[in-house]
Image (cartoon, rainbow, N blue to C red):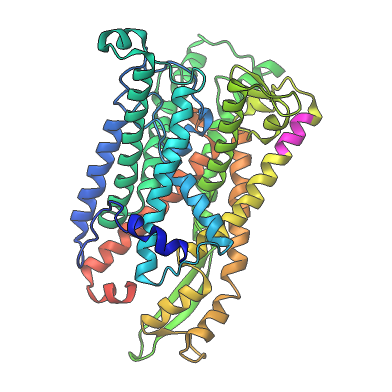
Amino acid sequence: MGWKETAEPVLTRMPSVRQPEGHIPFRRKLGWTLGVLVLYFFLTNVYLYGLPSPNAGTDLFGQFRTILAGGRGTVLQLGIGPIVTASIVLQLLGGANLLGLDTNDPRDQVLYQGLQKFLVLVMICLTGLPMVFAGNYLPASQQVAASLGIGIVGVKWLLFAQIFVGGVLVLFMDEVISKWGVGSGIGLFIVAGVSQQLIGGFFGGDQFFADWFAIVTGAIEVSPLTGEGIQTLLFGPGHLVALFTTVLIFVVVVYAESVRVEIPLSHARVKGARGRFPVKLIYASVLPMILVRALQANIQFLGQILNSQVGLPAWLGVYSSGQPVGGLFYYLAPIYSPNAWLGASQAAWQVALRIGVDLTFMVVGGAIFAVFWVETADMGPEATAKQIQNSGMQIPGFRQNPGVIEKVMERYIPQVTIIGGALVGALAVGANMMGTIGQVSGTGLLLTVSITYKLYEEIAEEQLMEMHPMMRQMFG
C-alpha cells in the first residue's frame, strides 16, 4: 500500500474553492480580483491582538517582507511565505520523482492540490510557532494577559491562532483569484505590497520628492564639486542611483519580456488560419525568483531562531541587532542595499565573497527553479506539444504528431528557460546592490514589473476571448 492510498482519505477532503463551471465573464473575473485585493489591503491593516504595539519585537523577515507580501504585526504576518515554501518542497520532491504523481491524471491532480494545502498548513505552523514562542520576535502583552486572565502563554497561543487564520486566508484568497479571477493571487499580493512601498518612496515624507525639495530650497546643503556632495546626490538624499536603477529595471524587464522566439503554427483543418507560439526570453516568468528568495529567507530565519535559542559558534554566525555580521549565515545573507557592501564594516574580501555567494545562489537557483517551474506548470516541451496538438494547430512542414512537435520545442524551451532564469537572478542581485526608490528590494521591483506586464497580457487575452468566443476553444 503506497503513500497515495494511505493519504488519499485526508488529501481529498482538504477544503478547496469550487472550480467554476463553464466560461466566466471578464467583468466577473475582474470583480473577484478587485474584491480579493481590497480584502488583502484590509487584512494588512488588522494588527494582531495581544502585541504591546504594532511594531513590537523584531521583524524576522526584514528585507524579505516585500517579496513575502505580508504585513508586520498583522494577521498577514507570514504573507505568502508558507505557500511559497510548500511549493519549494513540492518542486524538489517532484523534480526527484519521489511523489509518483501524474498531473494529467484527474485523481493525481486532486492529490497534488490536497498535498500542497496540507504542506501549507504545516509550514504555517513551522514558521508561526517559532515566531511566537521563540525569542522576543512577537512579544505578548502583559496588559492583555492580565485583562483576559489567561497568562503570557495564553496570549502567545492567541497570537499564533491569529497568524494561523491569516495564513489560511492568504491560501484561499490565492485560490479564489487563480480559479475565479485574473492572474495569480501570489503575484497580485506582491504587486500590491511593492507598489504601495514604491509610491511611498516617491511621495512619502522624507523621501524622494521631499528630499529634492529640501535640496532645491537649501534646507539640505549639497556641494556637487566635492566627493561628499557627489555621494549625497548619488546615494544620499539625492537618490539619483536609486532612481536610475528603478527606471532601468522597468526598461530592462519590459524589453526582456518582448524578446522571444516565435514558432509558426497553422491550423490543420482551416486553411489560412495561422498563428505563432512565442517562447519568451523570460519563459518561466520571474516567479521562480520568489522560490529562490523564499529559500534564502528560510535559511536566515533558521539562523536567527537558532542564535536566539541555543547560540551559534562564531564560524556559523555572529549576530548584531538580529542581523548576521559574520560567519556562514553572513555569507548566505543576500545583499539588499548599497549600504550592505559600500559602507560595510567587514573586510573587502568578506564583502566580495558575500556578493559572490549571493550572485551564484541567485543565478544557479534561478535557473534550477525555472526548470522546475516550467515542468510543474505544464509549460515544458511535452506538455506544450500536447496543447498545440489539442488546439488543432501544427508546425508547417512537420507532421501533425505530438512527438514531432515536442522535438521542435526541445530545441528552444529548455535552453531559453535556463538562460532566462539565470538572467533574472543576475538582474535582481544588481538591482539590490544599487538600491531602488522606497528601499524596495530589487527582486521585489523585478517581480512587480514582470507580473504587471503578464497581468496586462492576460487581461488583453481575456478581452480578446470575450470579443471572439471562437478564441476560447483555441486557448482551451
Instruction: Name the chief secondary structure element in magenta.
Output: helix
- Residue 275 percent location from the top left of the image: 41, 78
**Could you tell me which residue is drawn at 35 percent across and 48 percent down?**
185
314 to the left or right of 319: right
Q: Residue at horizontal 53%, vertical 86%?
A: 404
- Residue 297 rendering spot, x and y as whole percentages: 55, 36
Most foreground residue, 263 or 215: 263
Q: Residue at x 71, y 18 (%)?
A: 227
Q: Is residue 121 above or below residue 326?
A: below
How many numbered marks does the figure carry? 0
Looking at the image, which residue sits at the far front?
1
Query: Which quadrant: the N terminus?
Result: bottom left
Residue 225 spot, x, y in % from top left: 69, 18
Q: Position of 277 compared to 8: left or right?
A: right
In this view of the protein, which residue sits in the foreground, 101 or 137?
101
Q: Is residue 353 magenta?
A: yes
* Residue 149 falls inside the magenta stretch: no
Q: Which residues are magenta?
A: 350-355
Q: Is residue 281 visible?
A: no
Q: Nearer the viewer, residue 177 or 88?
A: 88
Q: Quadrant of residue 69?
A: top left
In the rendered image, the vertical position of residue 199 relative to residue 32, given as above or below: above
x, y (%) of residue 466? 22, 66
State the residue in front, 212 or 91.
91
